[in-house]
């Protein structure tokens, strides 16, 4: 994994290491752009949902720990984020059936 280190003295790569290695600063910009787009789209979907606080907590953890590793590929965090979206969708369907 030493090949993904930006500088040899650091012993951990970040989520930005691979985008930086592949495209330089443009890679970091594109990675961050996709990250923000995903955040705002999902936040807009969950704007009146009871799962919004869970989503914000999980996404905050992803943002913090991305300094140490790429957290967007870990199923421990991504699956609950998508479950918030799925449960929100199921709540809307069940609410429409009841009314």
Image (spheres, rainbow, N blue to C red):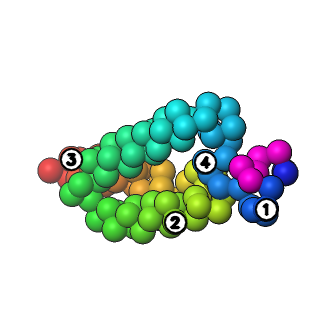
Secondary structure category for the residue under label 2: helix
- Asked if residue 8 lies left or right of residue 96, the reply is right
Q: Which mark is residue 9?
A: 1
The front one of 55 and 4 is: 4
Picture coordinates of residue 10 (x, y %)?
Answer: 75, 62
Give the mark nearer the N terminus: 3 vs 4. 4
For the question of whether residue 86 can be seen, the reply is: yes
Graded by Cα atoms within 10 Å as few (under 14), some (14 to 19) or many (20 or more), the crowding at tag 4 reads many
Residue at left 21%, top 47%?
Answer: 96
Task: State how far apart marks 2 and 3 are (Cα).
Answer: 37 Å
Which residue does the numbered mark 3 point to in the structure image? 96
Taking 47 as reference, is 16 left or right?
A: right
Q: Which residue was labeled with disc 2? A: 64
Q: Please give the name of the residue rendered at 32% of the width and 47% of the height, measured from the top-left corner.
A: 40
- Distance from the alpha carbon under mark 2 to that under mark 1: 22 Å
Let me know if residue 97 is in the magenta part: no
**How far from the left and from the top, in percent, is residue 26?**
52, 33
* Residue at (48, 39) in percent of width and height: 29
Could you give the CA–CA distance between mark 3 and mark 4, rounded to whole angstroms?
42 Å
Instruction: Say which of marks 4 and 1 sits in front.
Output: 1
Tag nearer the camera, 3 or 4: 4
Q: Which of disc 3 and disc 2 is earlier in sequence?
A: 2
Measure the alpha-carbon separation of dots 4 and 2.
13 Å
Label 4 or label 1, whichever comes before in sequence order: 1
Nearer to us in this view, 7 or 78: 7
Asked whether the viewer can see residue 77, the reply is: no
Residue 22 location, x and y as percent? 67, 32
Query: Which residue does the numbered mark 4 point to in the structure image?
Result: 16
Q: Are marks 4 and 2 in contact (CB under 8 Å)?
A: no
The reply to whether the C-beta atoms of the residues labelled 1 and 3 are less than 8 Å apart is no
Camera-side mark, 4 or 2: 4
């Amino acid at each position: 994994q030493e090949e993904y280190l930006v500088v040899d003295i650091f012993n951990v790569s970040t989520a930005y290491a691979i985008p930086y290695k592949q495209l330089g600063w443009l890679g970091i910009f594109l990675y961050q752009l996709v990250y923000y787009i995903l955040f705002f789209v999902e936040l807009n979907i969950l704007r009146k949902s009871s799962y919004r606080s869970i989503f914000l907590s999980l996404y905050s953890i992803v943002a913090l720990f991305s300094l140490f590793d790429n957290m967007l590929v870990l199923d421990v965090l991504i699956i609950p984020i998508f479950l918030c979206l799925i449960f929100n969708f199921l709540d809307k369907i069940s609410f429409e059936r009841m009314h």
